[in-house]
Image (tube, grey):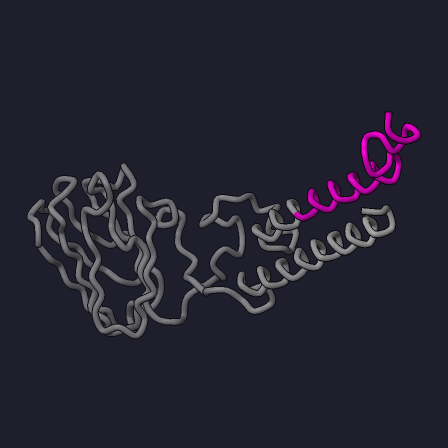
Amino acid sequence: MKRREFMRTAGGSTAAVAATTAATGSAAAQEDGEGGGGEVRPVWPSSVEDANLGTYQDARGQDEVTISVGAGEQGLSFDPTKTWVDPGATVTWEWTGDGGAHNTESVEGPAEWQSEITAEEGFTFEYETSEDDVGITHYRCAPHAQVGMHGGLAVGEDIETEEAGGGGSPDTGWPESVHDLGVPLHAHWVGLVSGVAITLTLGFTFYVLKYGESAHTGHGGSR
């Protein structure tokens, strides 16, 4: 291949890589909801946010929701840990039988309830929410509160909310500074890989222009 032809090929490859990077970054931004707003979730108290398991369910629109008591590998969690319901929904806590004796009792918030402490598998406790319960209620298992068995119940729409992943990004574990760059994380990786590819292409082009098309070209022909 002659140098001029090689330059056209290398230049086209570099442009193609750059175009692919731009397109991928744009698509990634759209997939991650950039400019469109993400999922809205309640702002939970720190004791709920740091609770064991940490699962979340948006159960608005449902008349009934069930929460497992004694979930997780050690049976020391509520699942879902954080639940959002409409006023009038019935919340049922159901015991798994794991993790020892548990209960569910409200700690702070507009709703108030307290169940008995039991280790019986299949035991249930029901609480019917109302307009008086609108807000966020932090609850716990009294016997295991010290080891993180807490939960949260959000009722109604008149509560403080935030966009999921809007700050700190607990779902991905990546530092907040990455999000401050304004580009989704996987687009950063695509850009990095593409940048390396472009650099290698340009470096190889420089080598061919400087030393010729083969190892012998720059030495006056074949030996």
Q: Is residue 23 above or below residue 176?
A: below
Q: Residue at x 79, y 39 (%)?
A: 203
Q: Residue at x 20, y 42 (%)?
A: 75
- Depth order, front residue of 142/223: 223
Give percent across and percent down for residue 167: 54, 52
Q: Is residue 126 magenta?
A: no
In the rendered structure, the answer to whether residue 175 lies left or right of residue 65 reads right
First to last magenta residue range: 194-223
Q: Residue at x 18, y 64 (%)?
A: 127
Give percent across and percent down for residue 181: 66, 51
Q: Main secondary structure of the magenta part?
A: helix
Report the number of numbered marks. 0
Q: Is residue 126 above or below residue 157?
A: above
In the rendered structure, the answer to whether residue 171 lies left or right of residue 127 reads right
- Depth order, front residue of 57/42: 57
In the current view of this chain or complex, which residue is farthest to the left?
120
Q: Is residue 217 magenta?
A: yes
Q: Residue at x 52, y 48 (%)?
A: 168
- Quadrant where the C terminus is found in the figure: top right
Give percent across and percent down for residue 219: 90, 28
Quarter where residue 138 is shown: bottom left
- Depth order, front residue of 133/15: 15
In the current view of this chain or complex, which residue is farthest to the top?
223
In the rendered structure, the answer to whether residue 124 lies left or right of residue 155 reads left
Give percent across and percent down for residue 105: 21, 52
- The reply to whether residue 138 is in sight is no
